[in-house]
Amino acid sequence: MGMQSDIKLIDENGLRIDGRKPDELRPIKIEVGVLNRADGSAYIEWGGNKILAAVYGPREAFPKHTQNPSRAIVNARYNMAAFSVDERKRPGPDRRAIEISKVISEALEASIFVEQFPRTSIDVYIEVLQADAGTRIAGLTAASVALADAGIPMKDLVVGCAAGKIDGKIVLDLNKEEDNYGEADLPLAIIPRTQEIVLMQMDGNMTREEVRQAIEMAKKAALFISNLQKEALRAKYEKGEIQKAEENLNAEVNKGE
Amino acid sequence: MDLSKKIVLPGEEIDINGFKQGNGLYFEDGKYYSYQLGLIQVYNNFVNVIPLSGKYFPSKNDKVIAKVIEIAPSFWVLDINSPYPAFLHVNDTPWKPASGELGKILNVGDTVYAKINEITESRQIWLSIKEPGLRKIEGGHIITVQPSKVSRIIGKGGSMVNMIKESTGVKIQLGQNGVVWLDGEPEKVLEVIKILKFIEEESTASGLTDAVRSRLEKSR
C-alpha cells in the first residue's frame, strides 16, 4: 500500500495486470491431511501463496496459568518462512506476525465450541512458505480445514477473502503488485452459514460506499471458497473408499493366483 | 432422505427426520447441524455423527489402556491419550501398599487396563481396576490407533477382532482410547499391526471383514 509507481494496474480493457477481471479470484487448490504427526493438517495454494496449516489438540494447556477453567484457548501462530518473500524475511515473530496470529486466533475461536474442552489449548500453526498478498486469509482458510481434519467441533468452516481498491476501482483478491501499489486492501473472513463476520481489517482509504461494495464482493467470493474447502475435505474422506477397498481386495486375490 | 453412512462436515445441515438429536449435532434457529467431520449413524431413534478423526474423549465405564506418568502419595497419574490426565486411587485397586510405596506396585512407565470410574464436573477422570479382567499389563507391544476406529476393529459382536486373534494366535487387548496391546510371536504381531492399520485406513469401506479375511488367509 502507498508505494508510488507509473504502472497501470487496470488496462484499457478493464483487465488487471495478471489478466483477471475485477471480480475474479486467483486459482485456489486445497489439500487435506498432508502431515502425519499433526492431529489435522492442510495445504493451500492460492495464486502465488503456498501455506501449510497444522492443528494439535485439544491438549492440556501449557504453561498452566494460561488454562481457562471454563473453556479451551485457541492459539494460532502465523509465521512467514525466511524464503517466502523476495528479500529475506528476518525469522521470528515481528509486530505484524503477532497481530495476524491474534486476529486469526479470534476468528477461529468464534466458530470452535471452546466450552467443550475446559483447561485445554487448541494449537494452530500456519507456515507461509511463499507469500503473494492475502496470506492471512489464505492461512485462515487452510487452518479451518485443518481443524475439521483434526475432528474439532465447530459451528462451520471459517473462510475468507480480500477485496480492495486499485486505480480507483473495487477489485477482488489483490495480488502482490496490486497490494503494494493499490489504494486499499480489505481482508475479510466469515462463518459462511450465518455470514457473520469474524475478521475484518483495512489498510488504505476507501469511502463508506466503497467499503460496503468491497465487503459484499469478498463475502460472495468467500462463499465460493467455502465450497472448495468442503470439496477438499470430502476428497480425503470419501475418496471412493468403497471402490478403493474393492480394488485392494482384487489386487490381493490376483497376487494369490 | 437416507441418513445412514453419509459423510458430513462441520456446519452441514442434517434433516433428522423425526429422530432425536444425538451426539455430534447442534441446534440453532430451528435446524440441526453437524459440529464435526463424521459419518451419520441412526441408533435407537437418535441421530449421531460418529467422528472420523479427533482425540479420545473419555466417558464413564469405558475400558482404556493407561500409562503411569506420575506417582503421588495415594494415587497415580496416568496418560489415557486424551486432553486430560487420569487418576487412579489406591482404594480403586486390588492392592494395599504402604503409604509412599506406590512405586513398588506401579512405577512410572507401567501400563494398566482400567475402567473409567468417574468423571467429575471439572473434568477430573478417576480410573478403577477393581473388576475382573482389569489388570496391570506386562510384556507385549503397545500401538495406538484412531480412537473412533476402535469399534470398527472390534467388529459386530467382536467378529473382526476374534477373527484376527484366531488366525494369528496373537493376544489382543483394545482400549476405547485407541491404545492396543498385542502379545504373541514377533512376526505375527507385525502382521496384526499391518492389519489394524489397514482397518483404520479403510474403516468406511463396506465388505471390510472379507478384505481382512483374505489378507489373513494370504499371510498364513
Image: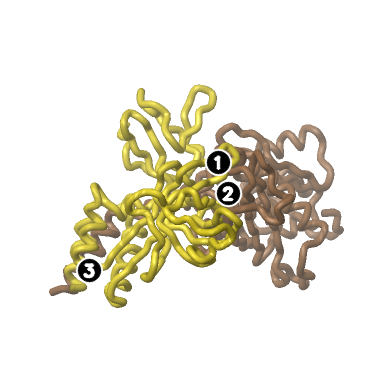
The type of residue carrying mark 3 is Thr
- Residue located beneath label 3 in the image: B168
Secondary structure state at the residue bearing disc 1: loop
Chain B colour in the picture: yellow
The colour assigned to chain A within the rendered structure: brown
Q: Secondary structure at mark 2?
A: helix
Horizontal side of residue A86 vs B65, given as left or right: right
The Cα atoms of the two marked residues, 3 and 2, are separated by: 42 Å
Q: Is residue A53 left or right of residue B217?
A: right
Task: Establish if B27 lies above or below A236.
Answer: above
Q: Which residue is mark 1?
A: A154
Instruction: Provide the chain ID for the residue under circle 2.
Output: A
Q: Name which residue type carries label 2.
A: Ser
- Quarter of the image for residue B50 reads top left
Location of the N terminus of chain B (image quadrant): top left
N-terminal of the pair, mark 1 or mark 2, is 2
Residues tagged by mark 1 and mark 2 found on one chain of the structure: yes
Q: Mark 1: few, some, or many residues within 10 Å (few <14, many ≥20)?
A: many
For the question of whether residue A236 can be seen, the reply is no
Q: Position of residue A85 (x, y in %)?
A: 73, 68
Marks 1 and 2 in Cβ contact (< 8 Å): yes
Q: Which of the chains bears the disc numbered 3?
A: B
Q: Can I make out residue A76 in this image?
A: yes
Which image quarter: residue B61? Answer: top left
Q: Secondary structure at mark 3?
A: helix
Judging from the image, mark 1 belongs to the subunit labelled A
Give the answer, above or below, for where A131 lies relative to A196. below
Query: Residue at coordinates 31% horizontally, 71% vertically from top-left?
Result: B189
Q: Quadrant of the C terminus of chain B?
A: bottom left
Q: In the depicted view, which residue is nearer to us: B33 or A203? A: B33
